[in-house]
Amino acid sequence: MSEELTKIIHSTVLESRIPAKNVAKEVGKPYSTLLREINPYDPGAKLGIETFFQIIKITGDISPLEYMADALGMQLTPKRGMKTG
């Protein structure tokens, strides 16, 4: 995973309206484990796709997905009738 994407995910968790400890609980991980998995300065850290998906669902922050889409030359748009964030 690129360092920039990892930084975005890190911010998603730590700057969420939901405290990071609650995000960790919701994804079923100890707080310290989740923080290690999203640490952009730990080259051995790995974040699973299931946890990544849960983080986005819990926080409502789609900025990691927007970064990924942009890197692929795409953009995200909500489904018709769906509210965002």
Image (spheres, rainbow, N blue to C red):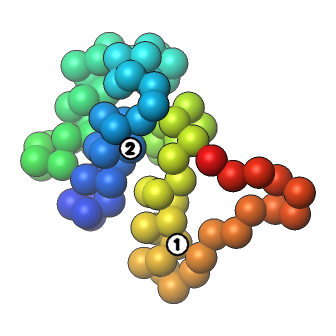
Q: Element under label 1?
A: helix
Determine if residue 47 is in view: no
- The residue indicated by pointer 1 is 69
Q: Where does residue 42 sit, x and y in percent of width and height?
A: 11, 43
Q: Residue at x 25, y 53 (%)?
A: 7
Q: Where does residue 1 sit, x and y in percent of width and height?
A: 30, 59
Task: Rate crowding at label 1 as few (under 14), some (14 to 19) or many (20 or more) other CA atoms within 10 Å.
Answer: few
Q: Residue at x 63, y 69 (%)?
A: 76
Closer-to-camera residue (14/35):
14
The circle on residue 12 is: 2
Q: Residue at x 56, y 32 (%)?
A: 58
Distance from disc 2 to disc 1, alpha carbons, whole Å, reads: 16 Å
Q: Is mark 2 in CB contact (under 8 Å) with mark 1?
A: no
Q: In the figure, residue 37 lies in which quadrant?
A: top left
Relative placement, left or right, of 20 versus 64 is left
- Of the numbered discs 2 and 1, the one sitting upstream in the chain is 2
Q: Element under label 2?
A: helix
Q: Compared to 57, does 78 lie above or below?
A: below
The type of residue carrying mark 1 is Ala
**Which residue is situated farthest in the right direction here?**
81
Relative placement, left or right, of 50 versus 8 is right
Q: Compared to 20, does 3 lie above or below?
A: below
**Which residue is situated farthest in the front direction here?**
17
Looking at the image, is mark 2 or mark 1 nearer the viewer?
2
Relative placement, left or right, of 20 versus 81 is left
Q: Where does residue 73 sit, x and y in percent of width and height?
A: 51, 85
Q: Compared to 9, does 72 lie above or below?
A: below
The type of residue carrying mark 2 is Thr
Closer-to-camera residue (44/72):
72
Q: Residue at x 62, y 47 (%)?
A: 85
Task: Rate crowding at label 2 as few (under 14), some (14 to 19) or many (20 or more) other CA atoms within 10 Å.
Answer: many
